Structures are given as C-alpha cells and as structure tokens.
Amino acid sequence: MRFLPAGDLAVSVELGDEISREVNARVLALEYLIQQKGLPGVLETVPTFRSLLVYYDPFVVGYEELVAALTALVPEARPEVLPPARTVEIPCCYGGELGFELEAAARRLGLTPEEMARLHASGDYYVYFVGFSPGGAYMTGMPERLTIPRLETPRTKTPVGSVGIGGVQCYIYPVESPGGFWVLGRTPLRLYDPTSADPTLLRPGDRVRFRPVDRAEFDAIAAAVAAGTYHPRIEEGSARPLPSGERAG
C-alpha cells in the first residue's frame, strides 16, 4: 500500500502492484467504505485497476489527516463488505458493418466469425473501472482463446456502441473516439447519457453478459432507446463472486 500526493487536491491510494480482480475488489471496497462513513473533506473518488484517487478539500481536511483516516480504513477494505454485484445484459449485433473487424480478428486467431462471436458472448465479464471516455467500461472475463494484440495502428474514429477486444480485455466505446481494440460488434444501448440522472450504464464491479442479436432486433432496440422506452435488463443484487485472482494484460 502506498499513498501518493496528486497535486494539492488529491491523493492516490495504491493497493497493489498487479492488475487482478482481488486487488480491484479491495479498491472498490475502500471506495465504498469512504462513501459509507462520509469521510470529512472527501469530494470525489475515482477507482482504477489497482488504485483509488481521492479528491479532497484542503480547507476541510489536511493531507496527513486524510492519509491517517484512509490508513485506518484499508484493513476493512475487503470484498465481502461490498453490496451484491449487479449483472447487466448487453445486446450485441456481431459482424457485418457493425462488427467490421470480426472477420479479420477471427482469421488472425484461426477461428470462424461464428466461433468468434459465440466465444465472445459466452464470457462472464467483470467491470474493472470506467474511464478513457465517459461511461467506457474496461472488462475482463473474455475466453482465453480470444486473446489478441491490439491494433498496430489505432483507428482515428470508432462508432458509438462498438464492442471491441484487445489483449485479454473487452471494451465498449460509449462515444465516438479513437481506438485500438478490434471491433467485433455493436450494442444499441447508450453507455453514456449526460441527460440521465445516472449518466453511465455500467459501474465498477458490475458483471456483464452479452446477448447476441440480429440486425432487425438491433434496429428495434435502437429505436426504443432513442424513444426512451427501452430499459436494459439489470439483475440487482446478484451474488458477488469471490475474487479469482485473474489478471489482465
């Protein structure tokens, strides 16, 4: 465990040297405890793979005082203190113009496009953290057979909702942005909606399952999302699995 000052308004709490579900669960547990106990002066918390960035008001709490309070909380930051995890279903249309790199990725891995899509949809994904773009979830849990290097030359634009993979990770692009993940498909859901009371669909610690849909269902869901009548399937209070120690590369 290390405390690193991030300017005069934040401190980074590093809880490990590796990227693993166990370390990440401790990060999320520490964030949860900070919120539950309402530590004086804390303004915002930002979880990452293995650390928690804590923003604070220096006129309310000093650096040393905050570090002392966080040090006292860390021993309690265990996965079992977290509330049960949510499971979020993500409809995804694989291949074609929506998954424009599915065939190329399948060839590189010696699979058929159908096998690639089936394997990807079979994964039980875990959201490490949300970042890079608002609402963008970095996930692990992809079948090992789909491990693939990221694109050597990242594209300058990736369509909203693109479902991509790179290394052992899966990522859904919440806004149009550059990207280096192989795009296998697209979801019609909005992962980021700034007009919503809860603007991001996915949260750190969520479990995600992809449900394959054809183009007709994709278009129907997209229309319902645009009309504000579609509600993603979310199972509240799913049993939170114990950390597996699985690493991301």
Image (cartoon, grey):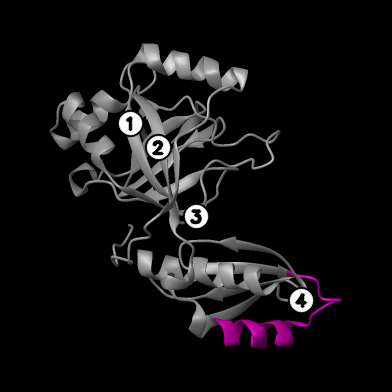
| Residue numbers of the magenta segment | 56-73
Q: Secondary structure at mark 1?
A: strand
Q: Are marks 3 and 2 in contact (CB under 8 Å)?
A: no
Specify the quadrant of the image occupied by residue 197: top right
| Mark in front: 3 vs 2 | 2
Specify the quadrant of the image occupied by residue 247: bottom left
Q: Which of the marked residues, 4 or 3, is nearer the chain's N terminus?
A: 4
Give, as a three-letter code, the residue at label 3.
Pro
- Give the image location of residue 171, x and y in percent: 42, 42
Give, as a three-letter code, the residue at label 2.
Glu
- Give the image location of residue 20, x and y in percent: 36, 65
Q: Which of the marked residues, 1 or 2, is nearer the chain's N terminus?
A: 2
Q: Is residue 112 above or below residue 22?
A: above
Task: Please name the residue shown 32% across and 66% down the image.
Answer: 242
Q: Are marks 3 and 1 in contact (CB under 8 Å)?
A: no
The quarter of the picture where the C terminus appears is bottom left
Separation of marks 4 and 2 at Cα, in angstroms: 37 Å
- Give the image location of residue 224, x and y in percent: 54, 18
Task: Please name the residue shown 43% across and 36% down the image.
Answer: 154
Separation of marks 3 and 1 at Cα, in angstroms: 20 Å
Within 10 angstroms of label 2, few (less than 14), some, or many (20 or more) residues? some
Q: Which of the marked residues, 4 or 1, is nearer the chain's N terminus?
A: 4
Say which residue label 1 marks. Answer: 211
- Give the image location of residue 184, x and y in percent: 33, 29
Task: Please name the residue shown 68% across and 36% down the image.
Answer: 194
Determine the residue located farthest toward the right in the rendered image: 59
Side (left or right) of 149 relative to 63:
left
Say which residue label 4 marks. Answer: 40
Say which residue label 2 marks. Answer: 89
Q: Nearer the viewer, residue 213 or 151?
A: 213
Separation of marks 4 and 1 at Cα, in angstroms: 43 Å
Secondary structure, magenta segment, majority class: helix
